[in-house]
Structure formats: C-alpha cells, structure tokens
Image: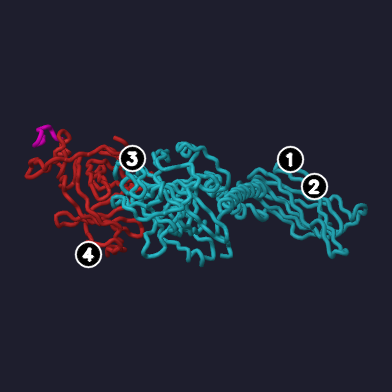
Amino acid sequence: MTTEVRAINCPACGAGQTIHGGGRVQTHVCPYCGSALDALDDFRVLARYTDMIRPQTPLKPGDTGTIRGVAFTVIGLIRWVESYGGKQWRWVDHQVFSPTHGYGWITVEDSGHWSFTRKLRVYPRQWLTPDMVERADDRPHLWIGGERMTYYETSDARIDYLEGAFNWVPRLGDRATSITLVGQGRMVTISGFDDDTEREVEETRLLTREEQESFGVAPQPHGPHPLAVRPRWRHHGFVTAVAAGFFLLTALFGLAFGNGDGTPLAGTGRIPVSDLPVELEFETAPSIRLVKLQLYTDVSNGWAWFDMELEDEAGEAVLSGGREISYYSGRDSDGRWTEGSQRGSVVFPVDSPERYTLSVEMSEYGSGQASDQLTSSVVDIRVGGLRFSWRPLAGTAGVFLLIFLATQAAEFLRRGQIMAGSDWTEED
Amino acid sequence: MANCPNCGDHVAEALAAAPMAVCPSCDTTLYRLDGRLLSAGTAGEMHDAPLLFGLGDRIRVAGRWHEAVGHARFAYSTGWWDEFWVEDAEGDGRWVSIDEGDVVSQKPLETPPVARVPRRVGAIVSFGEGYRVTEIDEGRCIALRGRFPERLAVGDTYDYVNCMASNGELLSGETHAGETEWFLGQWLDPFELEIERA
C-alpha cells in the first residue's frame, strides 16, 4: 500500500499529471502524448502510443464514487474492441482503486449500463477453455463459489485506447481472451487458458442507481443487459420445491389410497335384470367415509334408469336418487362410433361404523327417444368403501402442478431473456 | 504485575505474557526473557492509513471470530503491507495480511515443504498438489503495535516468496536470519469479510 498520490511531469511531453492508484500501479499512460511510463522505474518511457482517439466516456481519472459502501477513485481507462463476423463491439473499462478494497473496473456498456468488476480469489475445481467451449455439445457450466454458472460468451478483444494508471502493463493492440458465465445477479469472467498464464476469476455486477450517481452521472440505460433482467423470484426455489413436493405427495397418496373401487363391501355379481329390484346389505368400517356404488348393464343402443335408496340400520332412508346408463354405437362415413357407457357410478357419504341396506331398481328403460324397448339383459352392482374421494385430491394435485409449471415457465422465460445475447448456439 | 523497562508504566498481563509485545505507553517493543520484560527498541511509526480493520477489531475467519491483537507493518518495493496477528476466544491465532484489498489468512505449517526455497517466479514448489511461485520480494519491518506470538523487531528484513495453488491456496515462505518459516492459508474477500469494530 501507499497513500501517496504522486504528481509527475511526463518525461516525454512535460505535461504535469497526477498518478492515482496506490502502490500496485505499474504503468501510467500520459493522457496528453500517449507515452506509457514505467511506474516501477522512475516513470521512464516504455512506449508511445500516438493517434489514439479518446472515447466518449463520462468518467476520467480522479473521479470518485462509492461502490458497496466503499470509496473508489478512477485511476485509468482502457477501451476494448472486439470484432466478429464483420461486426465490432467497443466498451470502456475504467480502472478504479480503493486503499482498503483494492482494484476493480467500472465498465460503461453500449447499452448504457454500468457494471463493476473485481478479482475473485475463488477458483472452480474444473476449468473451462475456449477449445472446450467449441467442443461442447451442451452449454457449458462451472461451479464457482457454490453457484452453478452458465456459459454466456467467449470474448477475444484488443486494446485500442489507454489513459491513466493501471496495476498491470497493458499495451496498445494487446489481445485478451476470456470466457464469461452468468449466474444469479452476477457474471463471472475467467481468463488464463495456457500453462504460462495465471488463471484469473473476475466477478461483474451492475452498479445500482445510487452507486452510479455517486460518480456524478445519472443512469441512462437504453438497451438490454443480462444482469438487468429482473432477478429470480426470491421464493422461486421454495415455491418450486413445495409445489413439486405436494404434487408428488398428493398424487402418490391418491394413487395409493384414492384410486380404484375401494374396499369391497357388497355385490350382486352378474344377474339378470329380471332379478331386480335387489337389496344389498353392507357394514362400513370406522375408516370408511364414502361409499361408491358401481353399476354395469349390457344396455345397447338404449338407456336404463336405476333408482337407489339407502337405509340405515334403523330403517331410516339416508339417501335416495337415481342414475341413468345409456350406450349407443354405430357406423357412419367416418367409421365406427360410440356414445355413452355401459358403466356408471355414484359416490355418497356415509357414517361409520354403520350397517346399511341399499336397494336398487331399474325403474325405466328404453331405446332411442321414444321406444320403451328393453335393451339390457344383465346387471352387475358393486358397493365399495372409500376413505376419501379422489376428485378433490386430484384437484389439489392439479393446483400444485399448475403452480410448479407456472413458476418454472416464468423462470424459463427469465433465463431466455438473460441468455438472449449469448454467443452459444446449440449447433456449436 | 509487569512494568515497561523503558517508561515504567504498567503492562497488561496479556501483553506481558506474550513472547513479544509493544508497550502501549511509550511504543517500546518488549520481550520476555527468564521471567523479565526486556526492551527490544522502538516500535516504529505506524502512520495513519485507511485499513480494512485495525487493532482491537474482531473479524470472522474460518467460521470463528478473532480479535486483532498485534499489528505489524512491512515495507517492500512498492509500498507497505500490514500483518495482523489475530486470536480466537481459545487463544488460537493466525496471521492476516492486508495489502490494497488483497487479504490473506495464514497459519504456520507444522510440516513445511522439504524443497529449497525457490528463487524464480513461475517455479513450482513441490508441496501437496504443487504451488506456483507468484511473487518474490523482501519486506522490512517498519512498525509494530500490540502483541505477537514471536519476536519481531523494527528493521528486521524478511525474504519472502508467495506461491499459489490452482484452488487459490497461498503458500508463503519467509526467510529471516537464515531460518525459513512456511505459512499456508486462503484469500479472504474484503467485501465479504465480517468485521466488528472495537
């Protein structure tokens, strides 16, 4: 560390200037004549960069602001140019310095967003290189600091403008290759892809409005940025897990206990319709809450109406009603068709334990709309005990499934917005 | 009860019992020999400078709160860095060095590398998974405050070598008076470091 703010006269052009940036400054590039000076060797001239055109940027060396509660000073600026497929992208990085928190970068993006990048000392177990990205069948990922980061882009950029102080030795025309991955509210850029280069991991976050305004510039974002997409709903993980869990739970519970015909309580077997009416006696166990009556008759191109009455042990009618079963079939120009069913069921609540008598009678029948022709010959009546009805359970499972799908769909759309600018294509 | 041999002021037991301490009254460095406190000279000028934390502050390292009880400052080729000796509630200590946002917590290695101290940046130290030398320089102690687990003196010089593993672990070798000590530790994030001011 050094608390000195050094003032020098450029040995090439004589212009007086201030060197901001602490003890790690290695190079200072004179903003007047473009001379690169060696800060570690009495500011001797390392190189001269003429014909540089200063980029439009709202910041200059010496400007100060506050990021995450820490005061930073702009010490240098550097413009990068990336060319690909006949297009060019340019952006300006401003090196900033804090005596307590070290060095970082403020980048003013094309989209008007400002981001803050700093070095991380967290290294992934696996490394990723541009060659690995090229060979990958699926979009690559890295785990960094306990977070799964998703590949966003590979950048190969060169320097076309330098000004001020740097804690390294950038040279005009130098190229830098890096891979950027995106996670929750941050991007991580890795570089150093051969044995001779130190591996570096840098984290980028967007500056807040307050942080940007602390540098005296009002935010004016005018384009998309992957970090400007709304953050993941903070309850996403919880809601997804709970919805999925409850869906599975209700579905499994329903399959295990709610499906089927319940515990058999009574039945006629297949009997001729001439045996009707019949009475079925059954007893409900304490766990039985519902009784399901299932009817089958071989009605064909006709209908049958069944009257039902349920009496308790005291002979009191606790339920009465009816159920129509109709079934029609035929063949037309579209082929064979059927309508209706030869089966029907009725579910009704019961008290338990209790002894009941169920009487079933086929009171009416017919063929078509007008004929009273009997079209059925047999009937099969079964009574089963249920602990609950599967319908409300299925409804509940459906609600949880909808919540799960809606949450996932919203996240899918959000991820799509984030990745909209990625250079990854599935054909890669 | 112990008294500073220079100014005669009372020296707190915690300081008097340490292998090395600085008298808070006159900034004389003190060390204990045969039960007596002896003077080892001046503790140097600790110029005010912005610091991530200071003497008496508590920081959370490796899941435990530690108090900064000793503060040493070393000059090197491009400025200075600060070393804090921090101790947890059980008195277990470690070094935390700070230099312009680079913060490292290290403990002395009980079984250090057997290889010679490397003399070239980029060389690999054969220890564990291997550590690449990233920095070689010399540091000179310029100021001391608080207490320390070993004897330090203003003006002492240390040849140091920093080596990094692929997982970010930092191995440092410090050579002083022909003896080399090795330290191993991790980088700390200055933005994430939990600090309780004294």
Crowd band around label 1 with a 10 angstrom C-alpha radius: few (<14), some (14–19), many (20+): few
User: Could you tell me which residue is drawn at 35 percent across and 50 percent down?
Assistant: A12
- Residue A239 belongs to the span the image colors magenta: no
User: How crowded is the residue under tag 4: few (<14 C-alpha within 10 Å), some, or many (20+)?
Assistant: few
Examine the rendered structure and indicate whether residue B67 appears above or below residue A295: above
Residue where numbered disc 2 is placed: A322
Instruction: Check whether the beta carbons of the residues at disc 4 and disc 1 lie within 8 A of each other.
Output: no
Q: What element carries label 3?
A: strand
What's under tag 4, amino acid-wise?
Answer: Ala
Secondary element at tag 1: loop
Residues beneath discs 3 and 2 located on the same chain: no
Do the residues under discs 2 and 4 have CB atoms within 8 angstroms?
Answer: no
Q: In this view, does A72 lie to the left or right of B116?
A: right
Q: Mark 1 points at which residue?
A: A316
Please say if the residues under marks 1 and 3 sit with CB atoms less than 8 Å apart. Answer: no
What chain is tagged by disc 3? B
| Most distant residue in the bottom direction | A135
The furthest residue to the right: A370
First in sequence, mark 2 or 1: give its number: 1
Q: Do labels 1 and 3 share a chain?
A: no
Q: Which of the marked residues, 4 or 3, is nearer the chain's N terminus?
A: 4
Dividing the image into 4 quarters, which one contains the C terminus of chain A?
bottom right
Discs 2 and 4 lie in a common subunit = no
Question: How far separated are the C-alphas under marks 2 and 1?
Answer: 18 Å
Give, as a three-letter code, the residue at label 1: Glu
Q: What element carries label 2?
A: strand
Is residue B2 rendered magenta in the image? yes
Question: Which lettered chain is shown in cyan?
Answer: A
What colour denotes chain B?
red
